Image (cartoon, rainbow, N blue to C red):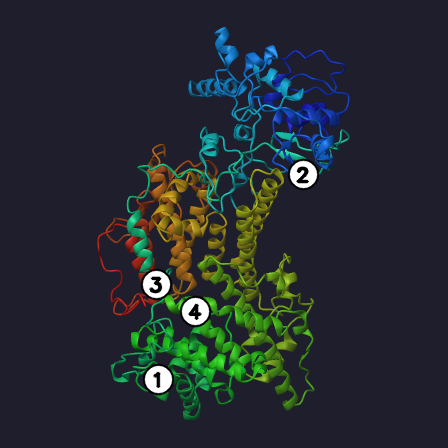
Amino acid sequence: MDLLCHAIGFSETQLSNGLDPERPKSPLLAEDSHRKPAPSRSSNRRCHICGRCYERADHLNRHLKSHENARPHKCNRCSKSFNRADLLNRHQAAHDRPPAERPAIERGNRAATACIACVNAKAKCQDQKPCTRCQARGMPCQTFSDGAQSKRARSSSNLESGSQVDEDYNEIPSSESLQHFSNVESGQHTSDPAGPYNTNSMAEATTLDPMLAAHDISSKNFQYNSHPTNSTYYNEIQDSSALNTAFPTYEDITIRNDGHFDQDFGLVPRSSYFSQDLDFGMWDFDLDTIELAGINDSNTSLSGTDQNHSPKPSSRMPKDASRRYAAFERSPWLWTPTKNDQTMIDQQDLNLDEDNIPAVLTPASPAASIDEFTSCCIHHKERDKMLSLLFAIPAAPTSKSPYLPSLNLLNSIIQVYFVQESFKVDQLIHVGTFDPSKTLPQLLTAIVAAGSSFISTPAIWKMGLALQEVVRHSCANYWEADNSNTRSLQVLQAFMIGLDIGLWSGFKRKMEIAESFAQPIVIMLRRAGAFASTANLFSADPRLEDSEAVLESKWRKWAERESFKRLVLHLFIHDIQASIGLQKPPLISVTELKFLLPAARNLWLAKSATQWRDLFLSSHRKYDVPAFSDAIHQTNLHQYSSQADIPLTAIALLHGHWGQIYSLNESKKFFPSSKSTHRLWLHTAYTELYQDLSSFSLLIPSVTNNSTRATLIAEFLQMVLHISLEDLHRFAGKFGEDETRKAGEEFVAWAKTKEARIAIWHAGQVFRAAKGLMQAQNRGFNAIMLYYATLTLWAYGHAISSAEDYPRSTANQNVILNETETSSSTLFLASSQGLPFLNVTDGGSHDGKTLVPLTEPDKVLGVARDIYSSNYPVLEERLPPLVENLCILLKDLGSLPGSRISRAPSEGVNR
């Protein structure tokens, strides 16, 4: 800012109305004030570099551009470029002249860059150096580029020797450089890649670091200070290297409440039409007319590595990079189909030996709740309809004739499903109006398949996976037979349940198919108007004078409308979780959901029309329920608690932040960070998004009845805002050995940034929330979140272990990541003081606890495996296939002693 103000003639006092009067002056201004001004007609608008003065501000701006030695104006007919638009116009006019009228210019013997001696003598020079003239006279033949390089080397030497040089600003050019710039202004365009105002040297200028922006969250007892006072602050800036989600490393810039920037930063005019009547008091200017001094990373990749040069081998590279890819090939994340992978390949799993099934219910399904869902049990007629679906699907050539379990076992599995659904905030099926005799066999089969996945007996969950395949094929056949069935609620629910089973099943083929088949149901519901406000047109409010038949009809219509809302929200949450876990674009945006908020949960759980009416009429309806897309901006959702399902709304809105996180990450990949408007926009978007997400996360316990799962999701989303999950997999070995080595170098630099400290803090909070989940609930997306948090801490541990300059902490500086915030954690986030630890249970210690430092990353993997296994306390039971596979992958990535992953490994988990 000071650079621009000084260039166009504004003083610090003239800006006192718009900027902080107590802010110290720029070192550039302080140094410039001791220089003698060059003779000029006026000192009102003087170039701070060469001393030239101009009467008009636009002339000064045009002159300043000559110091940049940039040529943004390119001819579209040839390869020439110019630093001024008028020169380009003059050149292009020459193209339009007939060849006979064009002036003949002899350039054959003209040197591209003349040496200093020939320039001073205005003599002819040659491209080959030393030139003939200098050799004949015995003079040194140097170009301006050589002089600038020498100057740069001297500057570097001064820095290394401890000279007091301000890191925030470029040093003032020497007289040698001034002469060079004078030549440029006079029309002699020389190429000086090492010049002090070349874009590559902009890295030394004042920069901004969006990751270190201040976030004033009043509800928290700490702030992420944007200006740490420790001596390593600028070293941290210079050493940082952005990953795919990391912002380019620029120095802090914050915006005060009065709308002005709180930090000096360099501005260089880019347009010759920059107005001298600029109103700095209101900051009313077009950002496209200025350039912030920054790093020219046109040759760097999105991950912060040079595209033209591969990273040099280093001892800090992962030594086990070669075997990591092999571990991923065995994991659920990579699948190579074979000729044996085909439909109904697991049909033989339908044939159960019920005599060898010891039990059905899991510890998380209390038997006392089973009796509440006896009305959901089926009879032989419904079982026969389900069996007919099996015979309608072509069987594998070597498979036996399929059959279903006994009616008693099927009913037990159905009851298990409804018990598990009662724990969820986004349950799909309205139990009060559920009638098995009027339910499609596709939905009944999907319920049995989903219920089977909750049971730890391998024979049962394998049967459930085989039935999931039946559901997928039978729903497709049902839609193809009559396209109007694409609007049928029950078949859409059945297909949605099938997607839920397959996506986090832990089996490669089923996970990929579930990911692929999410698009059809999204399109069907969108085309049916289930996302739009037209879903709110029907009104079925009950009245006391309604007859029993009218009341029953209203109740069922209301239940169907609410079921569609909850189906859409369930699909939306499913899509967001798939987008996060599989690192793909989301299919649904939260802004698409125009329908009213879902009704209150007590109305949804009403078991009869009469109970529904009484609850409806007794609720206090003081406010109009907003549309879901409007609820994004609601600051007080509690006021609708008697009318709307606030926990479900809050969970869906929390997932809605992912769309903005994904968009921000993609924008950082798409837009070049060398452009000031892009950097400032990305910085502002990140700051606002993190503050909004943090503020919303603080409300989660109060609006979700202290849901541990909701807290887990909130902490995880704050983590992924600061770390790229794709980069974690690159470092872990998913994309091969070369990418692993490149990511290793990037993580060493990333670990020194505040962005990294924020990421591992939220990763530790994910550990804490995952530890508090109900038994047998650390599965599905919950297990995926813990897995990515583990990789975050593991990668950070490897990075700081490889850094030779990483400080070693004493006992009073320990920072516990999986506990509540303390003063030590606040200090660690702000200034990197302290060493991060995980506090884990240890029966062998005197206090039952032990600290695991992140500098021992393999032990961090062991902590995660313990959290997985402790969520399933029955040692005789097998872990769910997905959890089993994740534990195996974590073991393969580490070098812990070869203990068994689980008490009883599941069979065929690598299918």
**Residue 584 higher or lower than 524, as above or below:** above
Which residue bears the numbered disc 1?
A: 409
Residue 206 % position (x, y): 56, 30
Counting residues from the N terminus, which is met first, the one under dot 3 or under dot 1? 1
Q: CA distance from mark 1 to mark 2?
A: 68 Å
Marks 3 and 1, Cα distance to the nearest angstrom?
A: 26 Å
- Above or below, 242 against 888 in this view is above
Return the residue found at the far front.
Answer: 100
Q: Secondary structure at mark 4?
A: helix
- Identity, as a three-letter code, of the amino acid under mark 4: Ile
Closest to the camera, between mark 1 and mark 4, is 4
Residue at which label 4 appears: 513
Q: CA distance from mark 1 to mark 4?
A: 28 Å
Residue closer to the observer: 864 or 889: 889
Locate the N terminus and report the quarter of the image it occupies. top right
Residue occupied by mark 2: 287
Relative depth, front residue between 739 and 792: 739
Task: Give the image location of residue 249, x and y in percent.
Answer: 51, 37
The answer to which of 332 and 301 lies nearer the viewer is 301
Of callouts 4 and 2, which one flags the residue occurring earlier in the amino acid sequence? Answer: 2
Q: How many marks?
A: 4
Image quadrant in which you'd find residue 262: top right
Q: Which residue is mark 3?
A: 883
The numbered mark, 3 or 4, whose residue comes first in the sequence reads: 4
* CB within 8 Å, label 1 to label 4: no
